[in-house]
Amino acid sequence: MRNERPIDNVINCMSRAIDNESLVYVGLSSALPLLAVALAKARGLRLKLLSVSEIYDAEDISITPSSGDPFAFHGGKGILTSLEAFDLARKGLLDIMFFSAAQVDAQANLNISVIGSWEKPRVRLPGGAAAAYLYVHSRKLILWLNEHSKRSLPAKVDFITAPGPSSDEKRRIVLCTPKAYMEYDQSISEWVLKSLIRGTDLNDVLSNMGFAPHMDSLTYMDPLNEEELSLLNRIDPNNVRYK
Amino acid sequence: MANKLVDLNYAIELINDGDWITIGGMSFHRNPMAFAKALGSSNRRNLRLLDREPGLAFDLLILSGKVDEVRMAMASFERFGIAPAFRIFAETGKLRVKEDVCEAIMAGLRAGAFGLPFMVSSVDLRSNIVKMHLDDNTWGLTRDPFTGKDVLVVKAIEPDVAIIHVHNADAEGDAELVGPKYEDLLKVYASKKVIITAERIVDEDYFKEDPSRLTIPGIKVNAVIESPRGAYPTSMYGLYEANYDAIKSYYESVRNGINYGNVVKLL
């Protein structure tokens, strides 16, 4: 019996959101995006990987507790600094960036800064890193949440670390949770629920969100097959992704 | 040739109470750990730390109680959680946190390194982080003379001291960094004083044999300290990997309220 873990669904969902021929950047605290990139490459996508580790165009990766670990990127062709990667993004050349957040709200704003007030936070979060910049300077943003809950998906964030798009912005924003896949549609300023992880109940998804997403036709996402799961186990033998 | 080789305790004397300090490396990689331990155990006070995405050395200095204020874009222990001392000290009001943005820290360091008063930034104006920096006068809004549009600028960042751990250095402070550079070169050029700790002290012939080895020129360096395994338990590219068990023990010990004196022994 295989036991599907929620985090593997998030990785699967993110990998399917990656487009072929993309220039991708992966930041710190991003073991799941690294696994999603590896999975997408194994499915035949041609990607160029830039990362906060500064190893340029690695052939293969292994997962350690730090996604910026230069020892975890194998077969790289050189060093490309984050300074240079961010300059490329400013020129509109970065296709895909990944972010997680403590809160993602109905208008696709991200909070990675504080829960409670700015002056006296109830929870001091790590900080938004590059989000206030790269969230608006990448063509596509793939967001992930480790939990699908009213807490992580409120109607309004406590603090806007990085702003959701206005109706005239072209960037595409998608979101993977352990239960669902959504795409933000700036023409209607709403999240659109596109698909559910197979076996997930629609009411369970909707009742665990702080806002109602738009819906038209729903699809179901199949879990990872054995081959894909064994790929994740090969590059993440210590199960860092579950910790 | 000037001989700038000193020991750790002498180099601590270059740091004054209240200084803004920036360190090299990132997260769990190439942190100047030996220096951070010496500074954390010194009698310096009211220090302030500036960085993009700091990790272990940054958190250890906060835990030492010698830091009043930090300015950084993210303080994460990645898969382990939020930087533990940073979080505890911030939530109990013992640490002023000025959250920044990676790109804006880079812009401020570029201005500092380039000798310019400010640098344009592309941080989005709708982020709530912007207002705080405008209020503090660390960022400003001005007009692009070519388009007439508003542009965000970051005031030059010129730390009092930069501490960079490198692979090889000679006695004059000429240094070689192998692999990832992060913003370390900007930090060297932006800071008023530069302290180099090095895995290995080499003869100046090491650089003369192959001038492309020179990453940091000695003219910008004030002190050099021999510090083999000086980044441990963070990684040193090409030499040794991060010890994640030690970092995890640190994280759990700090979360469990163990004090600096006992935690520093774990590293």
Image (spheres, grey):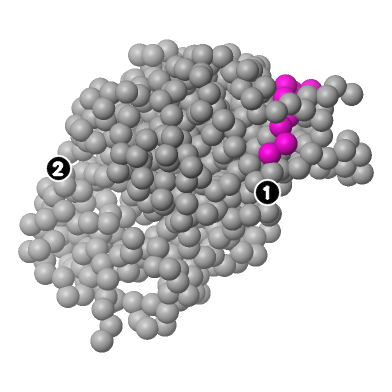
Identify residue type, mark 2.
Ala
Secondary structure category for the residue under label 1: loop
The residue nearer to you, when weighing A193 against B107, is B107
**Coordinates of residue A51 in the picture (x, y in percent):** 54, 51
Q: Chain of mark 1?
A: B
Residue A154 x %, y %: 16, 44
A31 versus A5 height, above or below: above
Give the label on residue A182, or none: none
Q: How many residues crowd around disc 1 within 10 Å: few (fewer than 14), some, or many (20 or more)?
A: some
Residue in view at x 38 percent, y 77 percent: A229
In terms of secondary structure, where does tag 2 sit? loop
Q: Which mark is residue B179?
A: 1
Q: Position of residue B98 (x, y in %)?
A: 38, 24
Outermost residue to the bottom: A1
Q: Is residue B197 above or below residue A180?
A: above
Of circles 1 and 2, the one toward us is 1
Image spot of residue A58 (x, y percent): 60, 61
Of the numbered discs in the image, which one, if any, rests on residue A155?
Answer: 2
How dense is the environment of label 2, judged by Cα within 10 Å: few (below 14), some, or many (20 and up)?
A: some
Residue in the picture at 52% in, 54% down: B243
Give the quarter of the figure containing the N terminus of chain B.
Answer: top right
Horizontally, residue A2 falls left or right of residue B166, namely: left
Specify the segment rendered in magenta: B218-227
Residue B255 vs residue B46: left or right?
left
Do the CB atoms of the residues marked 1 and 2 lie less than 8 Å apart? no
Magenta stretch containing residue B219, yes or no? Answer: yes
Identify which residue, A164 or B261, lies in the foreground: B261
The foreground one among A18 and A216 is A18
Q: Nearer the viewer, residue B4 or A186?
A: B4
Amino acid, disc 1: Gly
B122 inside magenta stretch: no
For the question of whether residue A6 can be seen, the reply is yes
